[in-house]
């Protein structure tokens, strides 16, 4: 097949949507398909080139003049590449793909990565809509996306072409016990609750340190929160035990060194960092929202706590820090049943969805025939 992925950019900045698309494009090219990406460009262009993935420059910045130029550019890309499948990973791409489809013949696929955004409903313009978790699929169905379009492909990142084998990373030196998160510095990631939870246990566990790995627009707000807590702490110096590490191109080094990994998100469709934390052998505490429980085998691979509840998070941290056998138990549990969290599985399921559309176009078979001919148990909502 000839597959064109549409993204806003291919920058190496820890963007999960970009990482998923780059993984798919490289694996699909490795499997013998003709693959291209249209985006505003970025550091991953080198990796894409190594795998034979062609890159087309396409700036989708949402200004009137630029969007007119993007339409013209998109038409030129379609004419040159002549894709069988256009796979859009962001809203502007699926809109372009749908409204300019009349002049070309391709199947349009959209992956819903952030269903909490109001504009995510526009992903329903595609012929097939991939949800990155069962929770996302149910949410999109409630918002009016026809269920016959929806398919579930849970995120998996292990074995990514972007990373090395986990055993090849050298852990950073952290002060232990070390609690870490790898997340964008956004309020919706629950960073504020994590800092507050750490403050609640800091006196009881004076050797513990908190490491916040990631960047984002709310970082300074969190830094001020940590400083304020430190100034009011009876022991003094608490803020010196909260470390803002910024974006790290190899977060695996922190995950390997951490005792406990925390993801305190308010919303999170299917975080890629959960499989990475599991592979690294962290004991995991995460909020019971969206696709997080699925990524943790519904609580078998990590401790689930309510979102926006710093007290519950503090209690979970205290239990693990005070009971070494319990900490070891959850570290072992995290590393069980990792096989389904691979990018290879994600790629194969994605190719099966492409094949549905190819059959529809070339043979005009009924949906019943497609169900008989393709194994779709794994896509059941």
Image (cartoon, grey):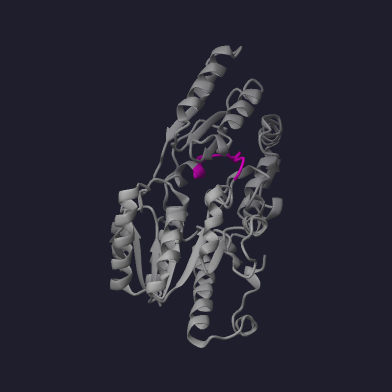
Q: Which of 306 and 55 is in front in this view?
A: 55
The residue sitting at 41% across, 74% down in the picture is: 31
Percent from the top left, x then y, of residue 259? 58, 39
Quarter of the rendering containing residue 370: bottom right
The residues colored magenta run 255-267
Residue shown at 41% from the left, 72% from the top = 102
Seen in the picture, residue 264 relative to 231 is either above or below; the reply is below
Location of the N terminus by quadrant is bottom left
Q: In this view, does 273 lie above or below 305?
A: below
Image quarter (top left, top right, bottom left or bottom right) of the C terminus: bottom right
Is residue 307 inside the magenta stretch? no
Left or right for 51, reference 360: left
Q: Report which quarter residue 3 is drawn in.
A: bottom left
| Image position, residue 351 (x, y; %) | 49, 73
- On the question of residue 245 being in view, the answer is yes
Give x and y (percent) for residue 241. 52, 24
| 31 left or right, relative to 49 | right
**Which of the two residues, 368 or 153, is positioned nearer the viewer here?**
368
Q: Is residue 112 left or right of residue 220?
A: right
| Residue at position x 29%, y 63% in the image | 49
Q: Does the magenta stretch include residue 258?
A: yes
Residue 161 visible somewhere in the drawing: no
Q: In which quarter of the image is residue 133?
A: bottom right
């Amino acid at each position: 097949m000839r597959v064109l992925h549409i993204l806003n950019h291919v920058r190496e900045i820890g963007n999960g949507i970009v990482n998923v698309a780059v993984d798919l494009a490289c694996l699909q090219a490795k499997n013998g398909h003709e693959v291209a990406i249209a985006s505003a460009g970025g550091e991953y262009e080198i990796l894409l080139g190594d795998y034979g993935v062609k890159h087309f420059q396409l700036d989708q910045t949402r200004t009137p003049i630029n969007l007119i130029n993007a339409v013209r550019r998109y038409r030129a890309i379609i004419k040159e590449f002549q894709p069988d499948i256009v796979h859009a990973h962001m809203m502007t791409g699926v809109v372009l793909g749908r409204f300019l489809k009349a002049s070309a013949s391709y199947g349009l696929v959209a992956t819903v990565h952030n269903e909490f955004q109001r504009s995510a409903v526009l992903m329903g313009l595609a012929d097939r809509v991939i949800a990155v978790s069962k929770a996302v699929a149910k949410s999109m169905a409630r918002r009016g996306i026809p269920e016959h379009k929806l398919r579930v492909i849970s995120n998996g990142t292990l074995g990514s072409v972007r990373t090395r084998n986990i055993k090849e990373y050298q852990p950073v030196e952290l002060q232990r016990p070390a609690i870490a998160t790898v997340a964008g510095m956004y309020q919706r990631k629950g960073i504020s609750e994590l800092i507050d939870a750490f403050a609640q246990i800091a006196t009881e566990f004076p050797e513990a340190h908190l490491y916040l790995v990631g960047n984002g627009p709310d970082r300074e707000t969190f830094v001020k929160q940590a400083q304020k807590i430190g100034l009011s702490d009876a022991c003094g110096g608490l803020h010196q035990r909260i470390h803002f590490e910024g974006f790290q191109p190899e977060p695996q080094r922190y995950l390997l060194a951490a005792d406990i990994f925390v993801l305190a998100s308010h919303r999170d469709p299917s975080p890629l960092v959960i499989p990475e934390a599991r592979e690294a052998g962290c004991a995991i505490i995460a909020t019971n929202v969206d696709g997080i429980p699925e990524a943790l085998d519904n609580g078998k691979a990590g401790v689930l706590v309510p979102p926006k509840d710093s007290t519950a998070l503090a209690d979970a941290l205290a239990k693990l820090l005070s009971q070494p056998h319990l900490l070891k138990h959850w570290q072992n549990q995290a590393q069980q049943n990792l096989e389904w969290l691979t990018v290879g599985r994600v790629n194969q399921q994605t190719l099966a969805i492409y094949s549905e559309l190819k059959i529809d176009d070339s043979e005009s078979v009924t949906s019943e025939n497609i169900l008989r001919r393709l194994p779709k148990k794994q896509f059941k909502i």
